[in-house]
Structures are given as structure tokens and as C-alpha cells.
Amino acid sequence: MVSLAPMEGLTTVYYRRALARWFGGVDKYFTPFLTPTQDHRFTKRELREVLPEQNDGLPTVPQLLTRNAQDFLWAAGELAAMGYREVNLNLGCPSGTVVAKGKGSGFLAHPEELDAFLEEIFSKAPCAISIKTRIGLKDPAEFPALLTMFRKYPLAELIVHPRVRTDMYKNTPKWDCFGDALEGSPFPVCYNGDIYTPDDADRLRSAFPAADRLMLGRGLAGDPALARRLKGGPSASRTELSCFVDQVYESYAQAFGSRRNAMLRMKEVWFYLIRLFLEGDKLSKAIKKARDPLDYESAVRSVFADLELSPVLRPDW
Ligand SMILES: Cc1cc2nc3c(=O)[nH]c(=O)nc-3n(C[C@H](O)[C@H](O)[C@H](O)COP(=O)(O)O)c2cc1C
């Protein structure tokens, strides 16, 4: 089973729909985090992410970022009423402002409070709850106690990104911590981190034959056909990539009523996607620097007209 990782600013509803239409291979789509607050109202942007009619019937799991059980339960209730069967708790976000508020991976540093929070949400939520976690705030030695805590609750799934908060997205994921989670957990465990090619996935599965759930983030953003390829399907064609990019751009332009704002979003898409092309540096800069949608559109036309597709994704982010 392959999931799309939540990526704030990238894997929006428009991105997810285009990904599903042109490439497929993804079994479960996670939304970037929503942050339920005390006023118990979703923002317009958050509603756009979760309204069922926007999600084209795709198997979608909304992700929540909060340390307040009442706010979590309010949001879970609203989402269950919309038809969602599962919501995901973010215990991984490493951003300074989030961690300072004790949310995301910052929550991992408050085990007693986290335990009380889990007790509350698992006893009262009207839908299943999965958790996406790092292996600690500063030290992987924090993970065994966290795992013992998680195992007290009926998680729908535990997604492990085996880095600590201070790694951010650098350093090598600690596969042995993922292995510890996989072994002996009473719930399904999903691996997330640095899977860029089918070979990477094969290596993981050789090390852990029971690892049958993968969540893909930057690898899928860099190669939108990666999930399909993991299931034996073909690599992305130039036409598919072009249709995909067009669909995301046009749906942003329509949603925002502004090609300029759409262009700003597309810069994030291209930050990852350009690595799938050979010698893309010059055009990557042109896309990054574009101030006018016409400049952006012209740079994108040149990518598809002038650049060869790379046989392998070359991540250097
Ligand atoms: C730009 C960006 C935005 C992200 N946003 C979220 C998010 O909203 N929620 C979350 O749980 N993780 C978020 N992540 C983390 C990813 O879901 C994923 O755990 C991480 O990128 C490692 O997986 P990968 O190596 O496959 O990319 C984000 C990562 C990046 C790079």
C-alpha cells in the first residue's frame, strides 16, 4: 500500500487530483495539516482541502495538528460528518514555531501530556485515528517509550518517519527504529523517508519483508509516477508530466482567480519536479525567478521542449 505524504504548500487538493488523474498508484492521500483552533471553524483554505466534492472521491485522510484534545475532537467530528473514516495526528512537524507551541514533533517532548491527549481522543473520536510520528525530539533513544505509549491505543496506522526533530529532513533515516515499530505493534506500521526510486523501496523490503506500507513525499513530488512504478507500472511520460503540470496550474489559477498566485504555487511544484529532467538548472532558475505568469509559462514550455527526462530522480534537496 502506497500513501502520498502530506506536504504543506504542495500536496493540496488540486495537486492530489492531478496526481491521481495522470499517474495513479497511490492508495491513500493525506492532506497537509489542518490546525483546529478554539473557535472551532475551518478556514476557507482548510475547507477546500476537505470538502468531499473537492476530493473527487479519492481515498483521503485529513491530517490534524494540535495539542488540544477538545479541538482535535471537534475537527474529527466535523470530518466524520463529512464522511471521513480516518483522521491523522501530526506528531512530526519540525518547524520552529510549531515545536515552540508543543505541537507536531514538539508534542513528543511532553509524554505525560501526550498520553492524556491520546487517552481522550481515542476514547471519544467518532472515527479511526492514525498517527504520523518522528522518533523523538532530539534523540532516537526517546522512541522506545513513545512506542510503548502508542501501543496502548487502537491506532488505525502508525506512520514512522525515522528521524528526530533536530534532523529536520537531513541525515539518514534510522531504519532500525522503523523495524522496532514494525515488530510487535498491534496496528499496521507504515515507513516514510527518502524513498526516491523502486530500488530504495526494494532495499527497505529486503531489510524488512513485513514492510508493506510506504508513504512517499519528496520522491513522489520529484517523480509523480513513483507510486505507479513501485507497482510495476511505467515511468512518467513527457505528455503526462505536461498534462499534470497544466492541470495543477490551471486549477490554482481558477481557484485563486489569479495566474500570478497560481505561478507562486507552481514554483514549489517545480522545486521538486525539475530534478526529473537532465540539465535543468538554467530553467529551474528561470522558473524560480519568474515574476510574471508569462515568463513562468515560457520557462515551462522550454522545459518540455528542450530537456531530456532523466532515467533516475536526482534528489539534492
Ligand atoms: C515542504 C514540506 C512540507 C511538509 N508538510 C507536512 C505536513 O503538512 N504534515 C506532515 O505530517 N508532514 C509534512 N512534511 C513531511 C513529509 O510528509 C515527510 O514526512 C517527509 O518529507 C519525509 O518523507 P520523504 O523523504 O518521502 O519526503 C512536509 C515536508 C516537506 C518537505
Image (cartoon, helix red, strand yellow):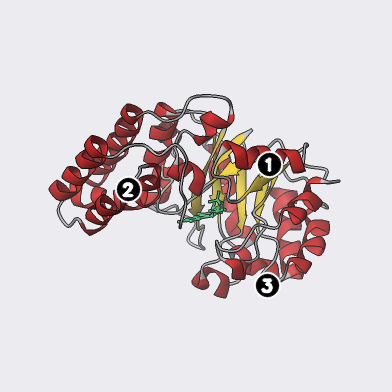
For the point 58% across and 27% down, the residue is: 231
For the residue marked with disc 2, what is the amino acid? Glu
**Residue that numbered label 2 is attached to:** 279
Of marks 1 and 3, the one in the foreground: 1
In the picture shown, does residue 250 fall above or below 161?
above
If you read the primary sequence from the N terminus, does the residue marked by circle 1 or circle 3 appear first?
3
Q: CA distance from mark 1 to mark 2?
A: 28 Å
Q: What is the quadrant of residue 243 in the picture?
A: top left
At label 1, the amino acid type is Arg
Q: Crowding at label 1, few (<14), some or many (≥20) Cα neighbours within 10 Å?
A: few
Ligand 1 neighbours mark 3 (CB distance < 8 Å):
no
Relative to 38, is 143 on the left or the right? Answer: right
Q: Secondary structure at mark 1?
A: helix
Labelled disc at residue 203: 1
User: Counting residues from the N terminus, which is met first, the one under dot 3 or under dot 2?
Assistant: 3
How far apart, in angstroms, are the residues tagged by discs 3 and 2? 38 Å
Q: Which residue is mark 3?
A: 138
**Residue that protrudes farthest toward the bottom in the picture:** 100
- The reply to whether residue 185 is visible in this rendering is yes
